[in-house]
Amino acid sequence: LAPTNEDVIRIIAAQLAEIGDQFDKEIQGRVVNDLVQHFRNENLSREEIILQMSRVVTELTRSIPSDMEQERAMLVLAMVLTKKIMNTVPSLLRPVFDTAVNYMNQQFHNYIVEMVSAVRQ
């Protein structure tokens, strides 16, 4: 039987969480603090903040193992950065969450759809 949507989501979440735990240790506080400053800068638009997040994720991706799928690594890095920012400055929860969701929808929508389809098969 094909797994239900809930089962698929659990499987994908477990895989991403495992990768995220590995990346969590490698992300320096300086990177998180720099992003926090961008979120606190009221002069920056949401698009500018998304662009900065994209730059940071791209930069961090250079240090990941070459055997890992690039898109998967970038998606997990975006999630880990989001978590770290919210843990550092909980008052930024809403704007950070909204920005992260928009960023992931823009950058990884097709990849997420492919992951779900692959697990269902």
Image (cartoon, helix red, strand yellow):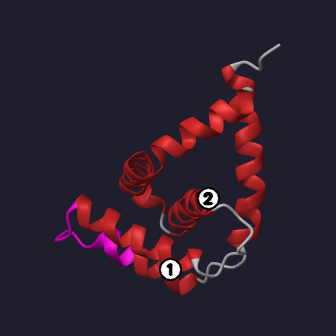
Magenta span includes 37: yes
Give the image quarter of residue 44: bottom left
Q: Quadrant of the N terminus?
A: top right
State the residue position of label 2.
76
Q: Say above or below: 52 vs 78.
A: below
* Image: magenta residue range: 36-45
Q: 120 and 23: which one is in front?
A: 120
Q: What is the CA distance from the residue labelled 2 to the residue labelled 1? A: 14 Å
- At horizontal 69% and vertical 35% (from top left) the residue drawn is 118
SS assignment at label 1? helix
The residue to which callout 1 is attached is: 59
Q: Amino acid at mark 1?
A: Glu
Say what amino acid the circle numbered 2 marks: Val
Which residue is situated farthest in the right direction here? 1
Quick one: quadrant of the C terminus?
Answer: top right
Relative image position of residue 89 (x, y in whole percent): 48, 67
